[in-house]
Image (cartoon, grey):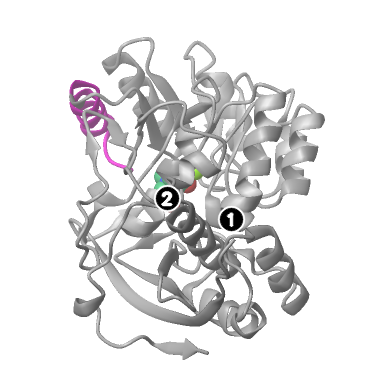
Amino acid sequence: MRAMKIARVLVYQHDLEVAGGLYEMSTSEVANLDTTVVVLETSDGTLGFGETCPLGPTYQPQHALGARAAIAEVAPAILGLDPRQPGVVYEAMNQALSGSVYGKSAIDVACWDLSGKAYGARVADLLGGAHRDRIPSYYGVMPASPEACAAKATELVAAGFGRIQVKCGARSLNEDIDTVRAVAAAVPPQTLLLADANRGWTQRQAINFSQATRDIALALEQPCDSLADHYAIAGKVCHPIFLDESADSIANIMDAVSSGLAQGFGMKISRVGGLTPMATVRDIAAARRIPHTVDDTWGGDILAASCVHMAASCLPSQHEGTWISEPYTSRAYPMISSPITNTDGWIDLPSGPGLGVEPDLGAWGEPLVTYS
Ligand code: 0XW
Ligand code: MG
C-alpha cells in the first residue's frame, strides 16, 4: 500500500444563516450557525473534508468555540498518521484529549473521506455497503398554532415526507396537545410522528402529554432533560421514548437499549464523535431492532453527506430518516459539487469517491488556523 500521511490540518469557519430568520425549539432558538470545517491534507496533496456544527451553545453541552478548542488539542497528535486508519487516528485523538468528541468528529469524518478517495470507494461502501442509493429524510415542524402546524404537515406529506417531528415544549402543554392532535389528523396514518420537546418538559408534563394523546400513534423524542428523567417516566408514559440529546455516548446508548429505556434514537453523528463510533451505534441498534435517525445538529453539505453515507449503510428497517439543514439554511459555504438536498422527502447518496462533495476552497478565503 502506498504511504499516505496527514501533513496539514486546516480549520475553516463559516456562518450558516437560518432561512426566514429563526430556528426555534423549546430550549433554544438560533438565527446563525457557526460551523467548523476541517480539511486534512495528506502528503500526496489529497484533501479530506469533515465538519462539526453545534446548534448554538444551548441545544446541548457543545459549542462552536469548544469544537475548535478540541481540534487545537488533537490536531498536532494526528500529524503523520495514516488517515485510512480512522481507528488509529481516533485513539491518537483520545490520547491527546479526553471527551469533546464533537470536535474529534470533524477529523474522523475527514479520515473516512480520505479513505474513500484512496480506495476509490464511497464512504457508504467502506461502512459496509449502501443498502439503498436514496434515503428518507424527515422534517421538524417549528412551534406555531395548531392550524399552522397542521397546514405545514399537510404540505410536507404532499411533498413526500413520511416522517414528521413536531417541536413541543415551547408553549403550554394544552397547546402542544392541540397541535399534535391537529397534525395527526392532517397526515395519513402511516406517517411516522414524533413529539420532540428537546428536553423542555418536566417529568409531569411528559407524562400528562403522553396520557392525553394516548390514542395517537407517536413517539416522544427527548421529552425531558436527563437520562434519569427518562428512567423515571418510563412505564408511566403511553408512547415509545426516542432519546436524542441524551444519546451522547456508546455507553449511554448501550444502557438505554439493554435496560429497555429507549425504543428509538434521534442520532447525531457529532454527538457520539463521528462515523467511527456511529457505526458501532448503528450495529447496537440493529442487534436489538431499535429504529433511529442519522442526522447531525446542523452543518452544510459536508456534514449532510456524511449523514447520508452512514444512513445508506444502515438497514432500511432500522433507519427512520435523516434530517438535513438544507431546507432551513439560506446561505451555506460555496461548493463545486451539487448540493445535498431533499427531493420528494428523499436524499440521494452522493456517488463518491469518499463523501463525494467538493468544496469551492478558492472561494472560502484563508483558514482560521493551520496545523503542520
Ligand atoms: C430536528 N433536529 C434533527 C435538527 C436540530 O439539530 C435539532 C434536531 C432534533 O431532533 O432535536
Ligand atoms: Mg430531537
> How many numbered circles does the render carry?
2
Is 146 in the magenta? yes
Rendered position, 142 above or below 80: above
Identified by mark 2, the residue type is Gly
**Majority secondary structure of the magenta segment?**
helix
Q: Is mark 2 within 8 Å of ligand 1?
A: no
Rendered position, 333 above or below 116: below
Which label number is shown at residue 120? 2
Identified by mark 1, the residue type is Arg
Q: Is mark 1 within 8 Å of ligand 1?
A: no
Which label number is shown at residue 72? none
Residue 147 in the figure: left or right of residue 39: left
Rendered position, 8 above or below 81: below
Mark earlier in primary sequence (1, 2): 2
Residue 233 in the figure: left or right of residue 123: right
Residue 135 lies in quadrant:
top left
Q: Position of residue 185 (x, y in %)?
A: 31, 14
Residue drawn at point x = 29 percent, y = 16 percent: 187
Crowd rating for badge 2 (residues with CA inside 10 Å; few <14, some 14–19, many 20+) = few
Residue drawn at point x = 43 percent, y = 80 percent: 11
Q: Closer to the camera: disc 1 or disc 2?
A: 2
Residue 175 visible in this rendered orientation of the protein: no
Residue drawn at point x = 36 percent, y = 85 percent: 367
Crowd rating for badge 1 (residues with CA inside 10 Å; few <14, some 14–19, many 20+) = many
Q: CA distance from mark 1 to mark 2?
A: 28 Å
SS for tag 2? loop
Q: Position of residue 13 (x, y in %)?
A: 36, 78
Residue drawn at point x = 43 percent, y = 59 percent: 28
Q: Which residue is mark 1?
A: 271
Residue 281 in the figure: left or right of residue 178: right
- Report the magenta residues as a range: 143-158
Rendered position, 100 above or below 115: below
